[in-house]
Image: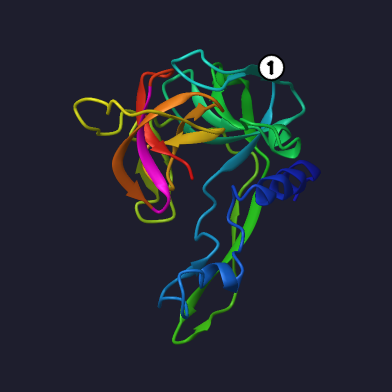
Amino acid sequence: MSHFSRRAAAILAAAGLIATALGPAAAQAAGGRPKEGSVQGHRRILIVTYHVVKDCHVRANYPSTRGPHWTVHPGATISWRYNVNRHVAAVSDPAQISRKAFPHWGFVTNRSCIGTSVGQTARYRVYRHGHWGPWHRISYPANRPVPKRILSGRSQYKPYWRRVAWHPSHPAHPSAHSRKTPNRTLRDAPHRFVIGDVFAGWHVHPTGRHKDGYTEVYVPALHRWGWLQP
């Protein structure tokens, strides 16, 4: 693995963005022993890291211009999640993660700035018959271009791609109640794709829908519905 891929993997692992193993305590957080078939890590690398070949212009939200904009320069790396359209892609910036800065998720508006993959490895294991099985190694090869498919991201389940709900289903009208929020990502569904960044002090209108700590909300600043990260 190259220096870039080792560094990118270490940074993303620290942020929980690639297939890193969860400790047994985390796997059993719900109480009792893990369920049959529980997985530590992921069966497939979901967030692929690429070389940056020219200035990548990133903004926190799209199509909204709310939130910061920044540039990732050639020689750095950037992690791809999905394409919004032919020009815009949802990405994570490893440098932002390294600085513990929010947001590290954003939208690169000129995805031709993204070169080929750096090459990554990870591992996972499965709980079977009362114990954790052996670790399995997975990898993503170097020198692959960014996929061209639109609003579709890598998944660990067959057919190994999942559709992005860019406009998630929602109630007809937002609730009248609102509350301020800390820095959070906005997802298309719990645990799934980032579709925006919500900043501390912004008002959101929560619905009565909750799942795994996520809350369905309307974000007036973005004119968007989605699921607010816990």
Quadrant location of residue 73? top right
Residue 164 visible, this orientation: no
Q: Where is residue 100 drawn, in percent x and y? A: 72, 37
Can residue 86 be found in the magenta stretch?
no
Magenta region's main secondary structure? Answer: strand
Depth order, front residue of 12/217: 217
Decide if residue 56 is on the left or right side of residue 174.
Answer: right
Residue sitting farthest toward the bottom: 129
* Residue ID at (73%, 33%): 95
Q: Where is residue 63 drawn, in percent x and y? A: 44, 16
Three-letter code, disc 1 = Asp
Quadrant location of residue 183? top right
Decide if residue 3 is on the left or right side of residue 225.
Answer: right
Residue 82 visible, this orientation: yes
* Residue ID at (71%, 43%): 8
Quadrant location of residue 36? bottom left
Looking at the rendered structure, the number of numbered marks drawn on it comes to: 1
